[in-house]
């Protein structure tokens, strides 16, 4: 399989961890970002220092033309995309009484529609080559819900349905599609909430701590590697045992 990976939202904490782990497995990387050019370019330099090619690409994944251009740019520079990791996402948290149309639309457009557009853009090449892996980064919130995150939960639950359905469509062409549901991870977003809230979250985790972003990188590498060759349509929960 082609050792070229496209990682959306690569400049964030999870995106960086995923990209670093894939680079360690020898992947050349197309690093998508929307606004964080400095972070994406810094990541690219770090990865290039370890002997792989890394190309930052700006795109708005809510726009089909941008996504198609991003995929063309990545493949022209690096070669056929063998792995697509749909990691880009955002939150606009509010209780439903205060949730605006804009809050709903931007979260669903980015988290769900953006993933659909990336999948639609990379699938034809993977099907033609009779190989490929797609990994969608969902969330524990998509599986169990969360107060004040109706829009986010809906988008991440949608990714689970997208994953299961697309896996059925692409299996005949030996393309696997799986999702990862991270739990509460040790990221700037989680660390940005009040300490009392953090402690309440940790109290719900049987392993007693937030997860390291590297755990998600390892999960992606597993699904992308030989061990994932006969796994498709599955949802891998990386959450410290919250469903025990």
Image (cartoon, rainbow, N blue to C red):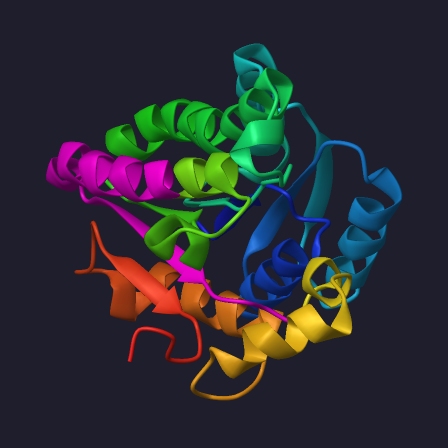
- Give how far across and how far down residue 69 sits, in percent: 60, 18
Residue placed farthest to the bottom in the image? 207
Task: Name the residue rendered at 50%, 27% in the picture.
Answer: 108
> Camera-side residue: 1 or 17?
17
Q: Which region of the structure is painted magenta?
A: 157-186
| Image position of 190 (left or right of 104) | right
Q: Is residue 178 magenta?
A: yes
> Camera-side residue: 193 or 228?
193
Q: How many marks?
A: 0
> Camera-side residue: 244 or 90?
244
| Image position of 59 (left or right of 39) | left
Task: Name the residue rendered at 35%, 56% in the picture.
Answer: 144
Task: Name the residue rendered at 68%, 51% in the picture.
Answer: 53
Quarter where residue 43 is shown: bottom right
- Residue 68's place in the image compared with 223, above or below, is above
Query: Is residue 1 visible to the viewer in this orientation of the structure?
Result: no
| Image position of 130 (left or right of 35) | left
- Give how far across and how far down residue 227 sits, in percent: 27, 70
- Residue 48's place in the image compared with 63, above or below, is below
- Give how far across and how far down residue 244 sits, in percent: 28, 80
């Amino acid at each position: 399989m082609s050792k070229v990976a496209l990682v959306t939202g690569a400049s964030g904490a999870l995106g960086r961890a995923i990209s670093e782990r894939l680079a360690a497995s020898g992947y050349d990387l197309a690093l998508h970002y929307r606004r964080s050019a400095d972070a994406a370019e810094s990541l690219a330099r770090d990865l290039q220092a370890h002997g792989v090619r890394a190309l930052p690409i700006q795109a708005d994944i809510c726009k089909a033309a941008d996504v198609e251009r991003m995929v063309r740019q990545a493949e022209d520079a690096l070669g056929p995309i063998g792995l697509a990791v749909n990691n880009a996402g955002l939150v606009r948290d509010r209780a439903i009484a205060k949730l605006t149309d804009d809050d709903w639309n931007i979260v669903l457009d980015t988290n769900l529609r953006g993933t659909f557009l990336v999948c639609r853009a990379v699938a034809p090449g993977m099907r033609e080559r009779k190989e490929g892996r797609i990994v969608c980064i969902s969330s524990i919130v998509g599986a169990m819900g969360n107060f004040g995150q109706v829009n986010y939960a809906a988008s991440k639950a949608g990714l689970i349905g997208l994953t299961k359905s697309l896996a059925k469509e692409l299996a005949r062409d030996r393309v696997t599609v799986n999702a990862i549901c991270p739990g509460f991870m040790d990221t700037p977003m989680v660390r940005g909430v009040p300490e009392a809230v953090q402690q309440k979250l940790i109290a719900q985790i049987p392993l007693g701590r937030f997860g390291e972003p590297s755990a998600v990188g390892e999960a992606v590498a597993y699904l992308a590697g030989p061990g994932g060759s006969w796994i498709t349509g599955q949802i891998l929960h990386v959450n410290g045992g919250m469903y025990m």
